[in-house]
Image (spheres, helix red, strand yellow):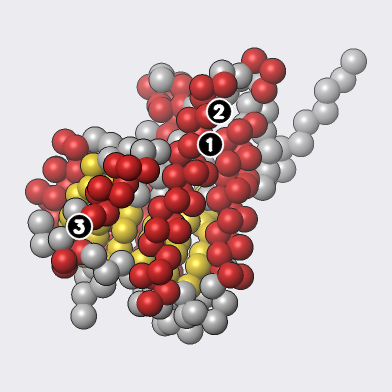
């Protein structure tokens, strides 16, 4: 029987690559995002029998409810939730940061994720499904200017592990994937500058959306008695030993 995945943030980067990978592996996918034209292109690419597009802003709970209610019968039974939607805005130190940027990150990375997860949990438990969340190494290793983004990803990492504890005995598998540098539209969105994005990834040989999607596909295909609790990935050219010393 064909299973159904629900993938947030599916219009670019990891989310887009994940939908493509899961469909190639035989899944149906509900693909969500804010850019209708990209979702339409994804449906045209992979087929309306394989992909159901839901265009809404995850921060808008009423729009989320309407989108979920609109799902056709074939896509209603969710076996896998991929909590991927998220963003970073700004790189200013906390004392100079824009509060609107902070609120947007909290609303998107934290609030929207927990609301959607709670709404889908009953069905996931009934079907003994799986939840995979895209956290970040920023939730473990702090860097200047990370402030609320790092805090929000620490929340994603630990909320996902807490789900694992709460869902003990239900048969639901839960995994926190915590990537390092992945070349997507992430830095472009964060800085508004393609040049800044190009400079960040230049010469690094970073991971790609497809690398993370392959990891998601592998975890999703594991036998139901196996659970990957958390997995941290970085490109070889990046590491976590970034301690700095300020000298007088």
Q: Are there few (<14), some (14-19), or many (20+) residues within 10 Å of tag 3?
A: some
Q: Cα distance, mark 1 to mark 3?
A: 27 Å
Q: Cα distance, mark 2 to mark 3?
A: 32 Å
Q: Cα distance, mark 2 to mark 1?
A: 6 Å
Q: Secondary structure at mark 1?
A: helix
Residue 71 seen in the figure? yes
Against 188, is 184 above or below? below
Q: Specify whether 22 is left or right of 133.
A: left
Instruction: Give the residue pinned by disc 2.
Output: 102
Residue 12 seen in the figure? no
Against 232, is 243 above or below? above
Residue name at image x 54 percent, y 82 percent: 169
Q: Quadrant of residue 12?
A: top left
Q: Quadrant of the C terminus?
A: top right
Instruction: Give the residue pinned by disc 3.
Output: 71
Q: Quadrant of residue 220?
A: bottom left
Instruction: Give the residue pinned by disc 1.
Output: 106
Give the x, y percent position of residue 68: 27, 54
Q: Which numbered dot is residue 123?
A: none
């Amino acid at each position: 029987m064909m299973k159904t995945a629900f993938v947030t943030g599916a219009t670019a980067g990891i989310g887009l690559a994940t939908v493509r990978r899961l469909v190639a592996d035989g899944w149906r996918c509900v693909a969500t995002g804010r850019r209708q034209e990209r979702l339409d292109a994804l449906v045209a690419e992979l087929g309306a029998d394989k992909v159901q597009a839901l265009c809404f802003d995850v921060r808008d709970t009423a729009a989320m409810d309407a989108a979920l209610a609109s799902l056709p019968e074939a896509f209603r039974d969710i076996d896998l939730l991929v909590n991927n939607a998220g963003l970073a805005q700004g790189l200013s130190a906390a004392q100079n940061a824009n509060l609107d940027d902070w609120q947007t990150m909290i609303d998107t990375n934290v609030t929207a994720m927990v609301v959607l997860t709670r709404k889908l949990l009953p069905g996931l438990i009934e079907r003994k499904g799986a939840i995979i969340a895209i956290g970040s190494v920023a939730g473990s290793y702090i860097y200047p200017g990370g402030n609320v983004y790092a805090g929000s990803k620490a929340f994603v990492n630990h909320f996902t592990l807490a789900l694992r504890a709460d869902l003990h005995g239900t048969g639901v598998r839960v995994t926190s994937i915590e990537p390092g540098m992945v070349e997507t539209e992430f830095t472009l969105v964060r800085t508004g500058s393609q040049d800044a994005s190009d400079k960040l990834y230049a010469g690094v040989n970073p991971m790609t959306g497809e690398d993370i999607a392959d990891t998601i596909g592998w975890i999703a295909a594991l036998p139901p008695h196996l659970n990957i609790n958390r997995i941290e990935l970085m490109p070889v050219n990046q590491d976590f030993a970034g301690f700095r010393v300020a000298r007088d």
